[in-house]
Image (cartoon, coloured by chain):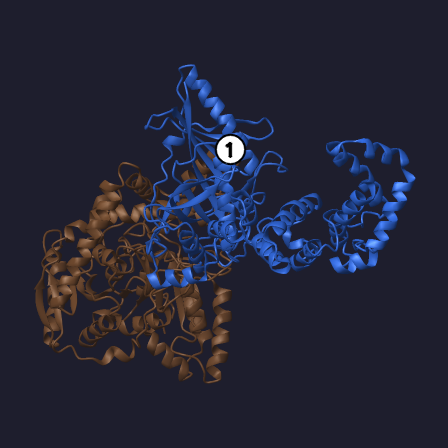
Amino acid sequence: MQWETVIGLEVHLQLATASKIFSGSPTTFGAEPNTQASAVDLAMPGMLPVLNEQAVRYAVMFGLGIDAEIGLRSVFDRKNYFYPDLPKGYQISQFAEPIVGRGHFEIQLEDGSTRQIGITRAHLEEDAGKSLHEDFHGMSGIDLNRAGTPLLEIVSEPDIRSAEEAVAYLKALHSLVTYLGISDGNMAEGSMRCDVNISLRPRGHEEFGTRAEIKNVNSFRFVEKAIRHEIERQSDILEDGGKVVQETRLYDPDKDETRPMRSKEVANDYRYFPEPDLLPVIIDTSYVEAIRETLPELPTAKRHRFAEQYGLSAYDAGVLADSRALGDYYEAAVAACGDAKIAANWVQVELLGQLNRSDLELGDCPVSAPDLGGLIARILDNSISGKIAKQVFEAMWAGEGTADEIIAAKGLKQVSDSGALEAMVDEVIAANPGQVEQYRAADEGKRKKLIGFFVGQIMKASKGQANPQMVNSLLAEKLD
Amino acid sequence: MHDLSVTQLAQGLRDKRFSSAELTRAFLQRIAELDGQYNSYISVDEAGALAAAAAADTTLARGEGGPLTGIPLAHKDIFCTDGLRTSCASKMLDNFVPPYDATVVRKFRAAGAVMLGKTNMDEFAMGSSNETSFYGAVKNPWDLERVPGGSSGGSAAAVAAGLAPAATGTDTGGSIRQPAALCGITGLKPTYGRVSRLGMIAFASSLDQGGPMARSAEDCAVLLGAMAGHDPLDSTSADVPVDDYLAGLGEPLAGLRIGLPRQYFGDGLDAATGECVRAALGEFEALGATLVDVDLPNTGLSIPAYYVIAPAEASTNLSRFDGVRYGYRCAEPVDLHDLYTRTRGEGFGEEVKRRILVGTYALSAGYYDAYYKKAQQARRLIARDFDAAFQQVDIIAGPTAPGPAFRLGEKNDDPVAMYLEDVYTLAVNLAGLPGMSVPAGFVDGLPVGLQLVGRHFAEARLLNVAHQFQQATDWHTRRAATGGSN
């Protein structure tokens, strides 16, 4: 049978507030265990939560970024369960009245095509601490630094149909939240954690199949692998006439498989009820509109603008608009050189390639956008060839100066002086009588190939600096 | 000295008739001599009290300080006190020493008051007789075989027996007013949000409110002035200006309309107690007030609504007592489940466990709509009843409790009979209104309380009404026979 995959994603996004959602403790990652846990975070008797307004602002920014209904009244609830890294015995979350309602945003696939993915809701909640099971001689350690860190739980509609789309969704989400500046989106540090709900149904059927939930898949690559594995597992079961069990599963990247986590997931009763220690959050439209005013151009809009304004392919526009910093870099380079297409090519191939090889972020890039633009300008005005430009770029990367400084210092400027070129051409012709003979005997078609040998010799003699167009025309003149 | 009111003591300190150190020592001595029979204190902080008294004397010697500088007080053991055990009368917190003060405690310290110690109470404030305390029952100073009421029974008994001039209490369903009534003192439960709950160990967050317990309305006015006010660290605390409660005590009652809810004078009210209350109401008429019958038709919903909402909130408020970070932990747990079940099974008393069970049940999937949601609807109806009544009258009056202090053990086997103790007080918490209990007479030598209920944030009016009554009567000046050497 042909199966269709149905995927919904729940992303827990850590918001980049300086302090926790209900206490004044800092949220810095990687501090010594329990050094960022206040009496509130430890759930000491009598302690009370106070809502961090910045978390509300960030949630509203996200809501505006996905064109969602903003909950002008939202309510915090208690989600009750016992676990040692949940100090109060309940998590403060939002259940019936979330701050962000239904919205949607566009994802772009590798081939440049796009899809709209619906967002069911997004709500604010606090993170739990961490239980550490190693190095405690059979006991568990509890680190409450993370307890109370603000999270935005973003729940997608079951609109995703493949592992590829799931990854595209996460990348688009990552791009959106980093554009907004509401999260660092760092998956390795747990700033973006993903639960995948996945089910299969016979193609063409309306009704959803039974889903499995895969918890805490924490890299784009693992999401893709976990989904591929889970599709295989479920289709094997269904093909054999079996039934998929509704359960929570864990992806093990070492074995590349998912396995059941807890068996009684359906039986969990969190006893949600409105948190009596907090008032409902009431915001008004002027608050929302004031936030809307501060929003930057968002990735989708930028992608469309790049394609239109600079004549880029959908794919190129997508790559360049992926992060706000890269988009800004690209536009600054275009401004400095005046050619959007060559700039797009240089940024994507040379710049991103070099960053990747050096394992650097754009923020650490040693070549500024105007300097890259300056280099491209020298290609455009024929001062150097594209090949020499790569050499200059490497020198710029190594901190040897601007393109002009390096070209001057290394004498890389293209030789376009016809006298000097003529001498070189004469020398090469004189030194290679056999090849000259061969050339002259050949027909028009073969000559085009044979002339390459002479060009190569001249470029070698000129260390690549001879103007290739002029060399070509001089050779044609002399050999014919 | 133990017979003087807070205002009289403040005057004595200012007139240098005695120092705060002398005053504090006198109360410490009375506690040492007499509290064996009442059991009203869980912890006494002699060293801390004397140090605070010495500091207060220095302030007073400079001619500085306010109405509470150097005045000894006791705090209910539900308020966290920096460096002093705060047990909530539970085995669970028998070893718990907070590293912080509750806002109420901090405010009293800042006002120069001297903390004598922490008073006994029902475990986690769950009870109406002070019999559920891990530290044993408190005895009513008017009759040692009777309960002082609860849950602030230790504070009520300590004030009634002259072991503190005044004390703090908390009131979730009547826990200030009912023990005040049963011990013959004056107690005020402020409007919900008037007094910060930060550092006050939560029982039912949407109902809990701290307030003063003292010998007179005037003393309550002094204490409330120090306790009340917005606390940015308690999101439910109200950002409403605090009145000058003392300055408001001179208003005559002529023209005051007092509403008498029919439902508060029906079946279940002890006849002699009812007579005391009616006689007291006669005093108000003599002072120029008008008595008006009012209707609170949903009064019957208050017990069922309260006994869903309060346990529901309590069941999750008490989840933090899990043996992981502080408080009691069972010996040698074998695994996590064992740690939880034995810690909580051994650390909580019967009544606390009963309420956790009830609350957990009420919030469970499939029952939420039938219980918790329904109870919230009932709560809104009850609040609406009061709103309607306050269209016709300025305050509402009636009995605080259905009868005087009952015998120790009398209602222990019947939780519902115990819950009926709060039949007149619960609705006030559910509606978030301020309520007071003032001494209004005696039945067989046992005090009877009159309850006064005001509009939201009308504490100043309530205190004035009570004060005018106390100017005209002497019930509040009657003292239980206690003995003692000073």
Chain letter of mark 1 equals: B
Q: Is residue B47 left or right of residue B371?
A: right
Residue nearest the viewer, comparing A205 with A50: A205
Q: Residue furthest right?
A: A431
B152 or B42: nearer the viewer: B152
**Relative side of A245 to B375, left or right:** right
- The foreground one among B57 and B293 is B293
In the rendered structure, which amino acid carries the disc numbered 1?
A: Asp
Residue B402: quarter of image: bottom left
Q: Position of residue A401 (x, y in %)?
A: 76, 59
Q: Position of residue A345 (x, y in %)?
A: 63, 47
Image quarter of the N terminus of chain B? bottom left
Secondary structure under the numbered disc 1 in the rendered image: loop
Taking the view exactly as shown, the residue that stands out farthest to the top is A240
Q: Colour of chain A?
A: blue
Return the x and y of residue A432 as percentages of the image width and height. Answer: 89, 37
Pick whichever, B409 or A278, lies toward us: A278
Q: Which residue is mark 1?
A: B335
* Rendering colour (chain B): brown
User: What quarter of the picture does the C terminus of chain B occupy?
Assistant: bottom left
The residue shown at (41%, 21%) is A2
Q: Position of residue B369 (x, y in %)?
A: 24, 41
Q: Quadrant of residue B435?
A: bottom left
Evaluate whether residue A182 shows in this view: no
Residue A368 visible to an observer of this rendering = yes
User: Residue A76, relative to residue B399: is it above or below?
Assistant: above
Instruction: Look at the picture and state if B138 lies above or below B257.
Output: above
State the count of labels: 1
* Mark 1: few/some/many CA within 10 Å (<14, 14-19, 20+): few
